[in-house]
Image (cartoon, rainbow, N blue to C red):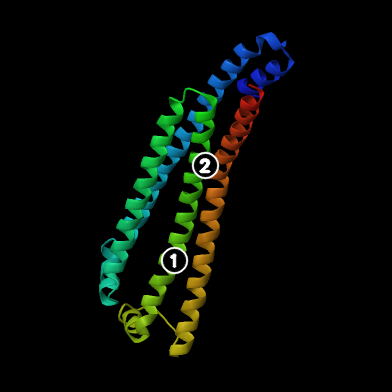
Amino acid sequence: MDALDKYKKAWDKQPEETNKVSKADIYKMSRSKSSSIVKWIFIIGILELLFWAGLNLSFVGSSYIELYETLHVETFVYSSVYLHYIVITVFLILFYKNYKSISISDNTKTLIQKILSTRKVVKYYVYFNLIFAITINIIFISLLFNDVDLLLEYYNTHGIEVPLNKDAFVTSLMISFSIAILIMFLLLWGFYKLIYGRLLNKLNNNYKELVKLEEAT
C-alpha cells in the first residue's frame, strides 16, 4: 500500500471537521502521483523513439539501399521513416505538455480534466503505432510484389535460394511476410499493453479517486 492509499483510508475514518485538511493533502499527493505517471509516459516515449530510430537506421543502412533502389521503393521507405519520426515527436511534445500542466494544476476539477486528456493522448499514440506499423508493412509488401520478376532476379543475383516456380516463390514470401507481420503486431500490442496499459491503469485509478474526492467536496 502506497502513501496515497494510506491517506485515503485515514481520510475516510477521520471526523468530518478535519476533512478539508485531509482533502488538500490527498489532492497534493494525487497530483504528485499523476505527474509522476505522466513523466514516466514521456520518458518511455523518448526511449521508444530512440528504439525506433535505431531499428529504422538498421533497415535503411547501406546493406538495404541496393535492395530499395532495385525495387524502386526507396522513396516510400524514407518517407515512412521520417513521417514516423515526426508523428512520434508530436506525441512526445503532447506528453510533455500534459506532464507540465498536471504538475501545476491548482484544483481537483482541472487535474481530472488533465488526466482524461492524457489518457486520450496515450491511447491515440498506441493506436497510431499499431496501425502505422501494420499499414506501412502491408504497403511495402504490395510494392515488392508489384514486380515479382525484379524481386526474383534480385534474390538470384545475390545468391539467395528461392523456389524455381514463380507461384511457389510468391506463396512462400506471402506466408513469411504474413507471419512476420503477425508476430510484429503481437509484440507491439504486448509491449503497449504491459507498459502503457499499466501506467494508464494507475492513472485511471487516480482519476477515480479524484472524482470521488470532488463529489465529496
Q: Nearer the viewer, residue 134 or 11?
A: 11
Q: Position of residue 96 (x, y in %)?
A: 39, 36
Can residue 50 be seen? no
Q: Position of residue 41 (x, y in %)?
A: 47, 38
Decide: is 108 above or below 63: above
Q: Residue at x 68, y 16 (%)?
A: 11
Q: Which residue is mark 2?
A: 119
Q: Tell me where residue 135 sits by quadrant.
A: bottom left
Q: Residue at x 64, y 18 (%)?
A: 7
Q: Tell me where residue 140 sits by quadrant.
A: bottom left
If the image is split into quadrants, where does the C terminus sit?
A: top right
Q: How packed is label 2: few (under 14 Cα within 10 Å), some, or many (20 or more)?
A: many
Q: Amino acid at mark 2?
A: Arg
- Left or right, 22 with respect to 137, comes to right
Q: How packed is label 1: few (under 14 Cα within 10 Å), some, or many (20 or more)?
A: few
**Numbered tag placed on residue 115 in the rendering:** none
Q: Which residue is mark 1?
A: 135
Can residue 85 be seen? yes
If the image is split into quadrants, where does the N terminus sit?
A: top right
Q: Tell me where residue 70 sits by quadrant.
A: bottom left
Q: Position of residue 60 (x, y in %)?
A: 30, 61
Q: Nearer the viewer, residue 9 or 3?
A: 9
- SS at badge 1: helix
Q: Position of residue 189 (x, y in %)?
A: 54, 54
Disc nearer the start of the sequence (2/1): 2
- SS at badge 2: helix
Distance from Cα at disc 2 to Cα at disc 1: 24 Å
Q: Nearer the viewer, residue 188 or 206?
A: 206
Q: Amino acid at mark 1?
A: Thr
Decide: is 26 above or below 98: above
Kindly report which numbered mark, 2 or 1, lies closer to the viewer in this rendering.
2
Q: Look at the numbered discs 2 and 1 and tell me whether their residues touch, using CB distance below 8 Å.
A: no
